[in-house]
Each structure stands twice: as structure tokens, then as C-alpha cells.
Image (tube, helix red, strand yellow):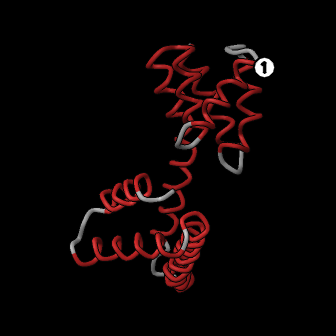
């Protein structure tokens, strides 16, 4: 019974909450604190603070923690699954709809516009990172890191993770 309650406590807020993790926090608090009484308001606030301090989506971190506190590893698995299932179902439904109408001129036109939009978004993101690098490290260091990264990636096919680690080491030892 506790697994079913955990599933509902995390599934319902994730299915009705639009806007991702921060938008469903009040819904989760209503379930975890108000409805089931698994935590106090203070405990929920501390869990939220801890979840915000760690990387990855807030909703899955909170689900894992609350689920574990309530019912151990099985509870964590059920709560995380309940958090992920709504997005998974929506994605499967959307992909099924797109696949079913893949020959439609409207879907083909939409598909043709996806790549350029993503490319523009990536350019904008890269430009923003570049400006942050210039503001934080200065032009010289940003150009050095950028040039070395480009050569390593393009000329020598170095894995991007190693390029990032190299930039981190450069920043740790060279930058003030």
C-alpha cells in the first residue's frame, strides 16, 4: 500500500503540474506534508534546499529522497518512476502522433524547421558562454581555451569530456 501511495503522491503532481520541477514543488509539498504526513514543513524545506544544491532535476532528487525515507530503496525507485512516467508517456504519445503523420506536409515542414531552430539556439547558447568566459577570464584566456579546445576536438578527435577537464585544469592553475 505504501508503494501505491508513493506512486500517487509523485505521479499526480507531475501529471498536472506544468512547468517542471519548480512548478510542482507546492503540489509535492501538499502531498508529502499535507496529505500523507511523511515529512514536516521544515523537513520538506530542508529536502528542497538540499535538492537545489545538487545537480540534476529537482523533482527526481526530491522523489528519490522522500521515497527512500518513506520506504527504502523500493520506495525511492517507485517515487522516481512516478516522477518520470508522465513525461515519458507524453513523449511516447507525441512521437507516436508524429510518426503516424510523418508523410503529412505539415509535419514535414515542421521537421524541416526544427534543425535550424536548434542550431540558432545552440549558437545563442555558445555566444552566451563565450561572453561569460570573456567577462570571467578575459579575452586572452578565453581565446586560448577556445583555440585549444577547437584543435583538440576537430583535429585530434579528443572526447569532449577530456576537453572540458583540460579547460578546468587550465582554469584552476592558470587563471587568477
Looking at this view, name the residue that lies furthest to the left. Answer: 156
Q: Seen in the image, is 4 located left or right of residue 145? A: right
Q: Nearer the viewer, residue 152 or 171?
A: 171
Name above or below for residue 160 compared with residue 82: below
Q: Nearer the viewer, residue 169 or 104?
A: 169
Name above or below for residue 47 compared with residue 82: above
Q: Position of residue 113 (x, y in %)?
A: 54, 83
Q: Which residue is mark 1?
A: 34
Q: State the quadrant of the N terminus.
A: top right
Q: Position of residue 6 (x, y in %)?
A: 59, 22
Residue sitting at 53 percent across and 19 percent down?
3
Q: Seen in the image, is 90 located left or right of residue 19? A: left
Residue sitting at 71 percent across and 40 percent down?
24
User: Mark 1, residues whose alpha carbon is within 10 Å: few (<14), some, or many (≥20)?
Assistant: some
Q: Seen in the image, is 164 located left or right of residue 105? A: left
Element on which disc 1 rests? helix
Residue sitting at 71 percent across and 49 percent down?
18
Name above or below for residue 44 compared with residue 160: above
Residue sitting at 56 percent across and 53 percent down?
90
Name above or below for residue 156 compared with residue 71: below
Amino acid at each position: 500500500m505504501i508503494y501505491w501511495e508513493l506512486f500517487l503522491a509523485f505521479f499526480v503532481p507531475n501529471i498536472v503540474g506544468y512547468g517542471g520541477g519548480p512548478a510542482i514543488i507546492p503540489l509535492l509539498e501538499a502531498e508529502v506534508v499535507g496529505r500523507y504526513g511523511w515529512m514536516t514543513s521544515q523537513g520538506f524545506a530542508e529536502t528542497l534546499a538540499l535538492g537545489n544544491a545538487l545537480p540534476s532535476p529537482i523533482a527526481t532528487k526530491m522523489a528519490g529522497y522522500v521515497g527512500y525515507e518513506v520506504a527504502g530503496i523500493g520506495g525511492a525507485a517507485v517515487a522516481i518512476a512516478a516522477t518520470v512516467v508522465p513525461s515519458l508517456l507524453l513523449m511516447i504519445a507525441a512521437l507516436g502522433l508524429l510518426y503516424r503523420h510523418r508523410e503529412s506536409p505539415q509535419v514535414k515542414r515542421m521537421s524541416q524547421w526544427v534543425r535550424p531552430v536548434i542550431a540558432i539556439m545552440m549558437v545563442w547558447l555558445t555566444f552566451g558562454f563565450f561572453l561569460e568566459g570573456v567577462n570571467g577570464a578575459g579575452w586572452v584566456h578565453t581565446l586560448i581555451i577556445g583555440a585549444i579546445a577547437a584543435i583538440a576536438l576537430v583535429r585530434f578527435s579528443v572526447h569532449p569530456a577530456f576537453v572540458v577537464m583540460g579547460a578546468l585544469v587550465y582554469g584552476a592553475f592558470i587563471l587568477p
